[in-house]
Image: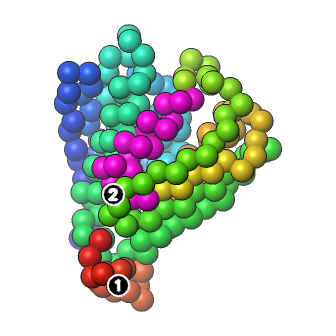
């Protein structure tokens, strides 16, 4: 099996982003984005997904965080797609339930090749510190469009908005880990009756 690593650069007039990752890493995260709360959430992806994830971004945060958050999601999606390759031998599907105190979230992912996001998170606040909770949709939409996955995100309960979104990101990391694991019984076969994903 080859190493499942990738680096992607994405440069626009709004953001300059570099993402490097190792899908078979040890959960190490390195972040320099100018968006501290998103960095805290991406650290959950790295730790719970056992993905080494290095993300740097120079963005127009003097306007707001929108472009940086969306474009980071896009670039991580591109890097995951590049690292996983043709998807032979992976489990393809992953799911996780994760609690944090009163909050509970469920995330289900399919490396189907068909981008789709269904996200039901009834945030109890519009902002967490200075971070606009609406931007999480933009992050995950960017990710699914460029990773080519179907992603269902449901926060089932919770009254603390920080807990709500942290359970989402932890569950996302764990669902990613499950879906991307190599399936020994599958060998190098394609996990689809279509023969391609």
Q: Indicate whether residue 126 is drawn in magenta.
A: no
Image side of residue 162 versus residue 29, left or right: right
- In the rendered view, tell whether residue 15 sits above or below residue 121: above
Q: Residue furthest bottom?
A: 185
Q: Quadrant of residue 29?
A: top left
Residue count near mark 1 (Cα–Cα under 10 Å), binned few <14, some 14–19, many ≥20 = few
Q: Residue at x 25, y 53 (%)?
A: 6
Dot 2 corresponds to which residue?
Answer: 148
> What residue would you read off at disc 1?
193
Is residue 89 in sight in this rendering? yes
The quarter of the rendered structure image containing the C terminus is bottom left
Q: Residue at x 24, y 27 (%)?
A: 16
Q: Vertically, is 47 above or below 179?
A: above
* Neighbour tally class for label 2: few under 14, some 14-19, many 20 plus, Cα within 10 Å: many
Which residue is pictured at 63% across the width and 51% down the height? 154
SS label for mark 1: loop
Is residue 46 rendered to the left or right of residue 78? right
192 is higher (above) or lower (below) than 132? below
Query: 191 or 8, which is in the foreground?
Result: 191
Range of magenta residues: 133-150
């Amino acid at each position: 099996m080859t190493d499942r690593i990738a680096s992607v650069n994405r440069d626009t007039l709004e953001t300059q982003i570099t993402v490097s990752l190792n899908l078979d890493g040890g959960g190490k995260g390195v972040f320099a984005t100018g968006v501290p709360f998103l960095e805290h959430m991406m650290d959950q992806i790295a730790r719970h997904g056992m993905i080494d994830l290095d993300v740097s971004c120079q963005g127009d945060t003097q306007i707001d965080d929108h472009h940086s958050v969306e474009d980071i999601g896009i670039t991580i999606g591109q890097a995951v797609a590049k690292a996983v390759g043709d998807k032979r031998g992976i489990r393809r599907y992953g799911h996780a339930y994760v609690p944090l105190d009163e909050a509970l979230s469920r995330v289900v992912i399919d490396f189907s090749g068909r981008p789709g996001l269904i996200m039901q998170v009834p945030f109890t606040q519009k902002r967490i510190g200075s971070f606009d909770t609406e931007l999480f949709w933009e992050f995950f939409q960017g990710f699914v469009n460029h990773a080519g996955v179907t992603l269902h995100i449901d926060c089932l309960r919770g009254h603390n908005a920080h807990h709500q979104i942290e359970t989402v990101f932890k569950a996302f990391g764990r669902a990613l880990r499950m879906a991307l694991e190599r399936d020994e019984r599958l060998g190098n076969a394609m996990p689809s009756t279509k023969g391609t994903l």
